[in-house]
Amino acid sequence: MIAQNRKKAPRLTLIAVSVLCLASAAGATPPTPDLSTRAVFELVGETPAAFAQSWNRRCAQARSRDRLERAAFRAQCARGFIDYAYFHWRETGESVPDRWRPLDRAVARVERNNAALLERQEQREFLDSWLRYEARQLLATNPELQTGDNRWLRARFQVVEASIANNDVRRFLLSTALAQHIDENDARGVPQLIDRFAALTEAPESEVARLRTAAQEDLALRDGHRIETYKTVDGVALELHIQSTAGSDANARPALLWFHGGSWATGSWAQCPVFCRIAREQGYVTIQVDFRTADRFNALPADAIVDARDALAFVRAHADELGVDRNRIVVAGFSSGGSIASFLATSSPPQAVAGALLVSACTVPLHDAWFFRSVIGDPADPRWTPAASLDRSDPALLLLHGTSDEMCEYADTEGFAAAASSAHVDAKLVTLEGASHFFVFNNPPARNRASEEAAAFLARWR
């Protein structure tokens, strides 16, 4: 029976090929190959040579009589090589060769200076990936970009200025980069780059004005409260933004030390949904921490953790002048900021932290592939696993986590809470059924319950 099937297979293949040929002759469109990011990720474990062979085969199947469609296929093909280069390193730890020839050949086939192609999403996505790829190369080799603030944004400017001649494409790339940076990061230093954008692109004043307004609105958040520099890195001041309720007494008060989220890459001190307000309503001094991220400083997670420890040390050392009771400091954060708070809670000296409020935190950060590849030293080092440092001297913990968290697994936080209890740490896990990672922003019932639990937790030190 097996032999019969083997003999029939070639004939079936010939029939299938004949059908496809007839369909093609009749004008039918051949199936479009999958050139999506998901398709790249399915091949991420392949060697560079094997991926190039497989991906080029897919690219060769992407044909069309329409010029814009052909250009879109070339853009998707090139983007696949760029995405593979990053994901392969992130998932396997192995890098593709510098200036990898298959990638460079695919990129060379894409028209980057054709503004008409910007109407295609595939072209826009390619340009975004290409710009990140080229900026990454510059950041690794250009000493000018290895100091100061806004390093990725500045690198993008240099790439566009050197490689893009078409003014409309320049405008699109730089305007998009500026708007995204302002939306996701601190806007310090950005007004000067907006001036540079205006000079480079001769963009309409209305477009420049929108960017200036966005930057000014972000910078205006700095008004009306105390700002202290807790350290300076490469000429950039890292700050503490200190706020409290009006009319409070002169006695030392509890403090909430807040760390924003952003997957270690983006984020701003000003991003503190709900919880800073709750703390101030309870008489806390809220201290929102500005720390190094990848976007602004090309920093690694370990750099952010160092900054967090320095911020805590500064607050404790200057508690009297800040009006803070150094024995009632609660550390808190969302997402990667929650991870930072978990490191402080489990590795600080006894009594340095009174409590920790962890919101959608990645309590096992090594499960994130980029964190795993980025840590300095041995990934098995317990310094990178908060649960490994738990002991009975650790502060009280409140963990707020959704069961449908797509970024930081609920099971990890459940395990962390169990480990804390086993170590005789006062830990409470609040399970938010069906809530996602961003429940604070998009799930009012979950946010309300989390707010109530946080208020009760903070009341312990009020």
Image: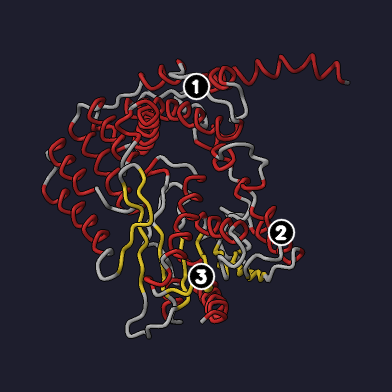
Residue 174, percent from left and from top: 25, 40
Q: Which residue is mark 2?
A: 415
88 lies above or below 288: above
Residue 233 horizontal/vertical position (percent):
36, 45
Q: Quadrant of residue 106?
A: top left
- Of callouts 3 and 1, which one flags the residue occurring earlier in the amino acid sequence? 1
111 vs 147: above or below: above
- Who is closer to the viewer here, 129 or 273? 273
Q: How many marks?
A: 3
Q: SS at mark 3?
A: strand
Q: Which image quarter: residue 341?
A: bottom right
- 188 left or right of 299 in image: left
Amino acid at circle 2 = Gly
Residue name at image x 32 percent, y 51 percent: 237
The circle drawn on residue 329 is 3
Which class describes the residues within 10 Å of circle 3: few (<14), some (14-19), or many (20+)? Answer: many
Q: Is residue 123 left or right of residue 395?
A: left
Q: Is residue 166 visible?
A: yes
Q: Secondary structure at mark 2?
A: helix
Cα separation, mark 2 vs mark 3, equals 25 Å
Which residue, given by chain and number where applicable, does mark 1 sit on? Answer: 61
